[in-house]
Amino acid sequence: MCVIIDANLAGKVFATPCDGDFKPLWDWVFDKRKQGCIVFGGHLAEELCRIRRVREGGTRALSELKRAGRAHEIRKDCVEREEDFVRSLRNASGKKLCKSNDPHVVALARVSGARVLCSADQNLHTDFKNLNVVPRPKGRIYQNATHAKVLGHTPGCIGRPRR
């Protein structure tokens, strides 16, 4: 699975050295044998660029990962179009399905096929796991080293290894 790193944890993930809770994630992305992949784009790409640790250490890492095919930037217009759709999702009684203030992250997951989210936002966790908001396969959450087992690929993921 490709992983989406939300801005609220990006500083810890891209710290040098990275925070211990994110070492399994970092190793998964950088170890060629593990074939991890980061997905970003749209408003999330803009948010990541505003974070000093990402800008100073992580941007070089993201550029390096993009060259290696381990990071994929999704076109802004694709994410924005899907974000508009996510904002329009309603349940049977007309209430919005997306509870978080991050429909751009949900849209990125829908467009890219990424189903692992690295975030501390509980409302975003709820959206990411809601099959009416992010369709199958069900989204998984990575917050610390004990969640290393969620790192892997699914058939719909754009970063999935090709055999």
Image (cartoon, rainbow, N blue to C red):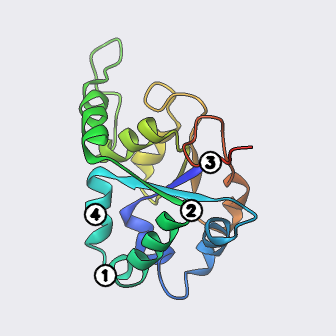
Calculate the distance from the C-alpha at mark 2 to the C-alpha at mark 4.
19 Å
In primary-sequence order, the first of circles 3 and 4 is: 3
| In the image, residue 107 above or below residue 47 | above
- Determine the residue located farthest toward the top in the rendered image: 92
Calculate the distance from the C-alpha at mark 1 to the C-alpha at mark 4.
11 Å
Q: x%, y% of residue 36?
A: 63, 59
| In the image, residue 109 above or below residue 67 | above
The amino acid sitting under disc 1 is Arg
Q: Callout 4 environment at 10 Å: few (<14), some (14 to 19), or many (20+)?
A: some
Numbered label tally: 4
Name the disc covering residue 133, or none. none
Q: Residue at x 35, y 28 (%)?
A: 97
Q: Nearer the viewer, residue 50 or 31?
A: 31
Is there any visible trace of residue 64 in the rendered image?
yes
Where's the C terminus, which quadrant?
A: top right
Q: Is residue 160 left or right of residue 105?
A: right
Per the image, label 2 sits on a secondary structure element best described as loop
The amino acid sitting under disc 3 is Met
Camera-near label (3 vs 2) is 3
Q: x%, y% of residue 89?
A: 31, 23
Q: Label 4 belongs to which residue?
A: 47
| In the image, residue 45 above or below residue 50 | above
Q: Label 1 belongs to which residue?
A: 52
In primary-sequence order, the first of circles 1 and 3 is: 3
Q: Label 3 belongs to which residue?
A: 1
The amino acid sitting under disc 4 is Glu
